[in-house]
Image: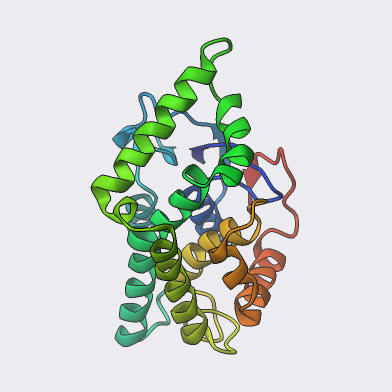
């Protein structure tokens, strides 16, 4: 059994974190049984969620966990791919994990309307009484991280144009294929689904959300992934089969 430690579900999707959705989606795609438990950043491997416990071993970082499970259980999702397709999947995943992710962070933590939606969820994870000041401290730290990473140095319009360009590229690569790399799903689909659904289902408006909604192939892709891998999911579900 794999114990998956992650944050809360919200907005009708399994988790507020795209990286948590990515890992849980991969587990469902690979058909590996797992149990979900509430996770905390404090004391977590690498200081982040998601993290897992596998046979008494604790591991952090969604991608490193996936690669470890591929080594242990075999490559259940990508064995059919040619080298060129594997390379394309790698580039797509890195674009989302390392670049588009920061647009998502900006849209949630910086924008006032989005923060009004997001803050109550973060606050619910904090200790009573002192939770409010802690949440605002975390927000200031996130904004500082955005500046250090570089996204926070750009104007609002520039940030969203970068995010929209990523989505346009994603839509072009998907085309009218059922999945990102062709007729059969592969591991990159876990990442793509996680980021798209995290944008499309987030309840606050933003230019990047509107741009995603305007890509019919991406919207249809999300629904196809949901029906295939999450048709049985409901808030409070704790185990995947």
Which residue is found at the position 56% from the left and 65% from the top?
A: 207
Compared across the picture, whether 28 is left or right of 188 comes to right
Q: Can residue 77 be seen in this view?
A: no
**Residue 12 appears at what percent x and percent y?**
71, 50
Percent position of residue 98, x then y: 33, 59
Which corner quadrant of the image does residue 34 belong to?
top right
Residue 220 place in picture, x, y as percent: 68, 76
Please state which of residues 97 and 26 is positioned toward the viewer in this rendering.
Answer: 97
Q: Which one is nearer the viewer's eye here, 118 or 56?
A: 118
Residue located 50% across and 40% down the image: 4
Residue 80 placed where, x, y %?
43, 82
> Which corner quadrant of the image does residue 88 belong to?
bottom left
- Looking at the image, residue 217 sits to the left or right of residue 4; the answer is right
Displayed quadrant of residue 50: top left
Q: Please determine whether, in this image, residue 157 is positioned above or below residue 1.
A: below
List the single residue furthest toward the bottom.
176
Horizontally, residue 87 falls left or right of residue 9, namely left
State the colouring used for the structure image: rainbow
Residue 88 position (above or below residue 143): below
Residue 160 visible in image? yes
The residue shown at (53%, 17%) is 131
Residue pictured at 63% horizontal, 53% vertical: 202
Q: From this viewpoint, which residue is outermost toward the top?
A: 129
> Tag count in the figure?
0
Front position in the image: 79 or 233: 233
Q: Examine the rendered structure and indicate whether residue 239 appears above or below residue 38.
A: below
């Amino acid at each position: 059994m794999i114990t998956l430690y992650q944050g809360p579900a919200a907005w009708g999707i399994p988790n507020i974190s795209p990286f948590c959705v990515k890992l849980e989606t991969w587990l469902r795609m690979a058909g590996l049984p797992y149990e979900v438990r509430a996770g905390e950043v404090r004391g977590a491997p690498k200081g982040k969620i998601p993290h897992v416990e596998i046979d008494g071993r604790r591991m952090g970082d969604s991608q490193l966990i996936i690669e470890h499970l591929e080594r242990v259980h075999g490559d259940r999702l990508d064995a059919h791919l040619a080298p060129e397709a594997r390379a394309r999947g790698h580039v797509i995943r890195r674009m989302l994990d390392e670049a588009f992710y920061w647009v998502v962070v900006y849209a949630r933590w910086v924008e006032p309307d989005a923060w009004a939606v997001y803050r109550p969820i973060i606050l619910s994870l904090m200790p009573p009484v002192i939770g409010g000041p802690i949440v605002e401290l975390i927000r200031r730290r996130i904004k500082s991280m955005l500046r250090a990473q570089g996204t926070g140095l750009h104007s609002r319009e520039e940030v969203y144009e970068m995010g929209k360009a990523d989505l346009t590229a994603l839509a072009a690569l998907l085309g009218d294929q059922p999945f990102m790399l062709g007729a059969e799903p592969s591991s990159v689909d876990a990442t793509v689904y996680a980021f798209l659904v995290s944008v499309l289902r987030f309840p606050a408006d933003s230019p990047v959300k509107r741009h995603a909604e305007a890509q019919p192939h991406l919207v249809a892709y999300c629904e196809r992934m949901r029906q295939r891998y999450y048709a049985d999911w409901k808030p409070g579900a704790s185990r995947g089969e």
